[in-house]
Image (cartoon, coloured by chain):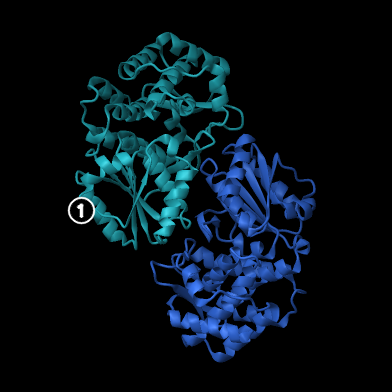
Chain colours: A cyan, B blue
Amino acid sequence: MKVPNYIHFTDDPTTTLIEIIESAKPDKLALLVDENTRLWCLPLLERFSADLIIEIESGEKNKNLNTCQNIWQELTTAGFSRKSIMVNLGGGVIGDMGGFCASTFKRGIRFVNIPTTLLAAVDANIGGKLGIDFMGFKNHIGVFNNPMAVIVTDKFLDTLPKRELRSGYAEVIKHGLIADEKYFEKLRDSTFPEMDWQEIIRHSIGIKGSVVAEDPLEKGRRKILNFGHTLGHAIETYYLNNEKSLLHGEAIACGMILEAHISYQQKLLSKQSLEMICDYLSSIYEPVVIPTISEINELMIHDKKNVGMTINFSLINAIGSCLFDQQVSDKMITEAVYCYGNLK
Amino acid sequence: MKVPNYIHFTDDPTTTLIEIIESAKPDKLALLVDENTRLWCLPLLERFSADLIIEIESGEKNKNLNTCQNIWQELTTAGFSRKSIMVNLGGGVIGDMGGFCASTFKRGIRFVNIPTTLLAAVDANIGGKLGIDFMGFKNHIGVFNNPMAVIVTDKFLDTLPKRELRSGYAEVIKHGLIADEKYFEKLRDSTFPEMDWQEIIRHSIGIKGSVVAEDPLEKGRRKILNFGHTLGHAIETYYLNNEKSLLHGEAIACGMILEAHISYQQKLLSKQSLEMICDYLSSIYEPVVIPTISEINELMIHDKKNVGMTINFSLINAIGSCLFDQQVSDKMITEAVYCYGNLK
């Protein structure tokens, strides 16, 4: 398994961060936080100080161009140069948007991401996908670019609400389903959330890192990481414009059940495996109200993973193995949505 | 001399463009133009057609985030995907902003630039600098990324006002001054604007291409291309917020006179060379009203080429040779500004 060389596992994030910054010799240092990570996570980085702290409001709804303009403005007013560094302390929103702002400020300054959620540690911070939402579409504007460092620790997980931990865990389960049967079995044998998170984070980063190293720009095999995400993103987008909130992993858990159903209908997956997957996911995640089939179709038209008007899925052909660029008919999607309704 | 492999010189831009697009097999094709290039240049691309034509208002004042949002919106509404291609037909604004929009739409789609001005052909389209202005600062937000192709032809030069041609010519003169004494002599022996533009474009692209190939991210030697630009940019920025307009090359011509003066004061350049440079530039470019020294200092604080608060210049130590990272005192800048005033 291939862990990208910019990943630093540590039990002592303060020391690791200070060492990285000192050897990089920036002229100025900015820290991006939201109100939660400022309150709960920043105190765990005692001894670290920045020239500028930029605080944004938490939540996916703020992952947009307006917030970027505020960030760019603060960097500009404080006289940040190409030799400056930005440290992004937070979950996926902070890492994706902070990384995008750094990658475009004066055509790119260096940045360090410190994921504070399980989701960001095992998923968002590995693989160089940066960006913001636009016109209601997730990650619609962005770039591929790697941080100079990602500092990974399980020290921040205690600051997380259980619901956030559960959300991140969906990507962990996905890593087992698409690439590592034994890992999935091990997860099933554990009791959420009493798990060895340090070990899980390392293992999941190894799986994602290996897939990304093979295909960094998602021309081919990297697409297997989209298992559960084609329908999952549509559901997540639907909730973006909805009063009730749905976290990324909650949408992906739902997407994985639907797409496992499609894998079964396409005769790729056995009934036994399908049931095992659905049972396990249902034991962790409560069922959610999903959009109607016509709403889903509308939401998927702009899905980045489409080529023109054809909708391609990543589907599993066994637990621990995944295929990509699988064309799926509207009928199959409808049937999966129908089955999910019955499951509840 | 090294011409980047994505540059295509041609006498028949339509055929070259159609061949490039056909072999790239996009699912959709957008064309970005402004009102001028739509009227004067697009008709020269007979037989070429796009699925979507995006027209923006011409001029540096529109090279901003608002225009980008309009471009991204039009691409989104027309269902553009990662397999789509954008063709940017225009000068530096169209190439820089269109390239930035393409490079960030869905984390990057392919784009082809067709420079229609001398400035864009010899400068803006070589070297992968893309971006927009922000908070009054030039190219403050952007990325480094290369087009899949740049189609270079002198066919569009006839559509240019003479003032635009003269503006682009400043970068040509700069190429001689920083890297090729014989080229500068040849330019001096010609009569502007009756010149062999095809030959000049090829030669200038060769000089810029070689410098960029050596140092694509401008960590070192690429900085020599900034000769005339440290003060030139300050003057250009000053005019951005001014009623009177000043074109990029007009500001750079003025910047080169000022920075040649500084080169002389720093005892890098002989008096004879300084006079030769000033005489030639003054024979092509009318003197302009420049900001006061305190305004210049304020404008330069955020210049991208600064490291922290130190202002570094690229200075010539002979005609055809340039040094970078030369620290210059406020006093020297003041003196150069004073000399420029006397020159008028």
Q: Position of residue B111 (x, y in %)?
A: 61, 48
Q: State which quadrant residue A271 falls in.
A: top left
Q: Image height check: is A258 above or below A124?
A: above
Quarter of the image with the C terminus of chain A is top left
Q: Position of residue A147 (x, y in %)?
A: 37, 49
Q: Who's the residue at 62% across and 59% down the image?
A: B60
B243 or B263, which lies in front? Answer: B243
A28 or A128, which lies in front? Answer: A28
Say if residue B320 shows up in the picture: no
Say if residue A194 shows up in the picture: yes
Report which residue position mark 1 lands on: A47
Q: Amino acid at mark 1?
A: Arg
Q: State which quadrant residue A285 falls in.
A: top left
Q: Who's the residue at 53% across and 89% down the image?
A: B270
Horizontally, is B79 left or right of A57 in the view?
Answer: right
Q: Position of residue A322 (x, y in %)?
A: 43, 26
Q: Residues within 10 Å of mark 1 (few under 14, many from 20)?
A: few
Q: State which quadrant residue B225 falls in.
A: bottom right
Q: Position of residue A25 (x, y in %)?
A: 31, 62
Q: Image height check: is B326 above or below B237?
A: below
Quarter of the image with the N terminus of chain A is top left
- Badge 1: chain ID: A
Horizontally, is B218 left or right of A8 in the view?
Answer: right
